Image (cartoon, rainbow, N blue to C red):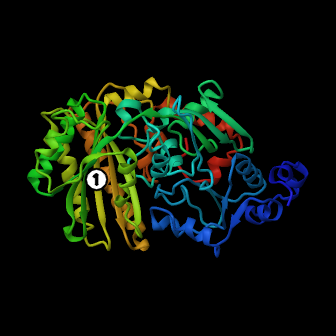
Amino acid sequence: MISTWGLLASAAVLSGLAHADTCSTLKEISNIEVTENLDLSYLEEQNDYWSTSCSAMKPSCIIFPKDADEVAAIVKVLNNNTENFAIKSGGHNPNNGWSSVAGGPLISTQQLKQVILDETTGIARVGPGQRLDSIAKELQGTGWTFVGGRIGNTGVGGLVLGGGLSYMSAQYGWAASSVLEYEIVLANGTIATASATQNPDLFKALRGGGNNFGIVTTYVLQTYRQGNIFGGNLVFLHTDETDAKLLKAVRDFTEYNTDDKAAVIVTAERGNIDLIDTWILFLFYDGEVVPDGIFKNFTDVGPLLDTTRVQTYSDLIGGSNWVIVKGSVVQIGTETIPMPSAADSEKVMGGIHAHWRNITGTRLLEPGIIASIAYQPFTKQIAQAARERGPDLIDADDAAHRLILELNYSFLPQGDYEKMDATLQQTYGGVRDRVVGWQQDGTLPDIYLPIFMNYGFHQQDYFARLRPENRAFAHAVSESVDPTGFFRKRIGGWKP
């Protein structure tokens, strides 16, 4: 068979393919791997989503490009029809249609999984087909680590394009803050480089701009020196007293912790008729020896279980996938709140948590229900570290400490999607209403509160919560690199 790129580069051939479907065209004229619904690789890839609602969306075929040239060839064929399509890295975003598609082609990046490290500079070339646990495994033993998320099965593509919150964000900013360069296939099928010196507007837009600008085929990342770390979980049973102590502890940690190597995630979970009603805390310290008192406010509450230990970062990330609820529909939403003063901690933190318990309490008979809320410090240090590493669309300032809330529901019946959709909107909407009210009466400061793309629900308007000038900037960049609206009109995701 003749080479993919040589054939597809022919304008005459492409013009003759107008309106033909992408799957059959690629199978006929290229050697790009194209799989259909009875192929094992199709079935495996289609079932590899965090949410069964995404797996239920059946693409016409799944395409597995192995390099940027093949991605460019696919985009050129797509330009000759009107099919909707999707691009999938890890499939962890549970919003239907974001990395999944019904009836159109799915472009899987699973063969774009290179990890090439320069052990002198710590600069790594990483493909979007990598997961966080697989990158950590590749880097294990080199003395270098990357700024990634906290769950190993997360795909690098969606994480980095959404910003990416890390245990190491107070040291190094968002995951996107450590991207030095993107190799990207644009809407017209050309391969471009975006960096601080080449296409700098596109470079900024890709830092927190999602999938609007092209298909990233390589991330050039700055990695950082790291030895063993300390990490693991603390588990507590729910009581009103425990709730109050842990909510105060995470608020106080957000304000008073000055050691950028320390990080926490404080998560409450509930299951059917409260058979599960617990707190699960994730503790992290970037080093083997934790200074006295760093996590004392949490450990003093008296955990039922403590799994914290000195280990490698690879072991920590690889051991985190137990949080993924297999075989369930998953919905995730988010809100960002100002850190309340110590005097108003009980009013704000307690009020938000009471609201969460009230709403989740109405859904405890939902088959397979697991509801969770995670309180994650979004400190001034994170904003400072991100800004030190160049501009991004999130553009967080260090005027105040904040907290990012992640709100999750998982459940079994796919037929209950709309009902649970409304429940999630009630959950984050109630948080937002309370925050706005507290800002109006002076309880909370009236500060910039972007929502975090990686946790955003499809009903939330990510770009509307950015600074207006950054939303306008993202729209202008999108129109510049994609004047026909190829990505804006034909794939899912938030649009500027």
Q: Is residue 42 above or below residue 112?
A: below
Amino acid carrying label 1: it is Ile
Residue 430 in percent (x, y) is at 28, 50
21 left or right of 330? right
Residue 471 in percent (x, y) is at 52, 35
Q: Is residue 22 above or below residue 283?
A: below
104 left or right of 206? right
Residue lying furthest left: 241
250 left or right of 380? left
Say which element carries label 1.
strand
Which residue is painted at 50% across and 27% down in the image?
A: 391
On the image, numbered disc 1 is attached to which residue?
373
In terms of depth relative to the viewer, which is nearer, 317 or 490? 317
Visible residue check, residue 266? no
In terms of depth relative to the viewer, which is nearer, 154 or 21? 154
Q: State which quarter of the image contains the C terminus.
A: top right
Residue 407 in percent (x, y) is at 33, 53
